[in-house]
Image (cartoon, rainbow, N blue to C red):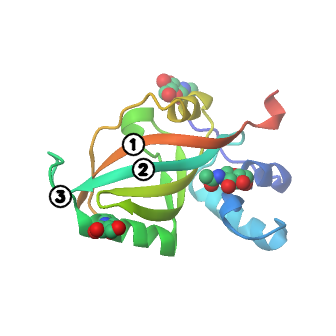
Amino acid sequence: MKTSLFSPQGMLLGALSLLATATECSAMGTANSLLLTSIAESVQLPMFTWSANGTHTAKGYTTKQADITSVEGMRQDCENINLNKKLSVDFRSDVFGEGLIGYFYKCENISHDTNLYWFTISSGNRSQIDRLCGQKSSYPIVYDSQHNTWFVDEPFYCTQRTAPSNVF
Ligand SMILES: *[C@@H]1O[C@H](CO)[C@@H](O)[C@H](O)[C@H]1NC(C)=O
Ligand SMILES: *[C@@H]1O[C@H](CO)[C@@H](O)[C@H](O)[C@H]1NC(C)=O
Ligand SMILES: *[C@@H]1O[C@H](CO)[C@@H](O)[C@H](O)[C@H]1NC(C)=O
């Protein structure tokens, strides 16, 4: 069950503060709250969230058997993220269940078969963030129809974590 969204902007901005780390604005003034409120509403961001940011790697393949690197698919995915960013609602629900919201805002091709991604992730369910940052989950190969590529997600390394200050 998702907690429904609420409106007081101060708290909403707190919940969304990590969303702003990728932008270069120094202050989250009224100019930004319309954008952030709109994003929070459309992804049904819960009132209290646990968040983390960091990096992770993934490999892309042309088939489910993961034998041939999908050079073109990996290149396009990286390019799309660098140009347009990506907000992923119910990110890896096959592993974590529903409710993880992932924001991917930077990508680098670090070897012939590996992309490195910068992410910020958020959830109203703390155990999902614990599991993701605990690096113990394994990720079944998934098909990305946009890039016609099978992706294998590798562990997520969390560099910073935040908890809703109101619950402690
Ligand atoms: C995580 O967020 C902190 C605080 O905004 C920032 O300094 C750091 O660079 C971020 N880490 C990554 C990997 O994006
Ligand atoms: C990544 O870069 C290497 C060269 O460093 C290149 O051989 C490879 O094709 C690139 N892969 C992608 C997916 O762009
Ligand atoms: C929180 O996430 C875990 C999976 O990490 C799941 O087992 C649990 O049911 C979730 N709790 C709620 C209240 O959704």
Mark 2 in CB contact with mark 1 (< 8 angstroms): yes
Callout 2: SS: strand
Residue 51 appears in which quarter of the rendering?
top right
Residue 152 visible? The answer is yes
Residue type marked 2: Thr
Residue 146 visible? The answer is no
Which residue position holds label 2? 57
Callout 3: SS: loop
Residue 41, percent across and down? 63, 56
Q: Which disc number belongs to residue 62?
A: 3
Callout 1: SS: strand
Which residue position holds label 1? 154
Residue type marked 1: Glu
Residue 148, percent across and down? 23, 63
Residue at 44% from the left image edge and 34% from the top image edge? 97
Q: Residues within 10 Å of mark 3 (few under 14, many from 20)?
A: some
- Residue 78 horizontal side relative to residue 140, left or right: right
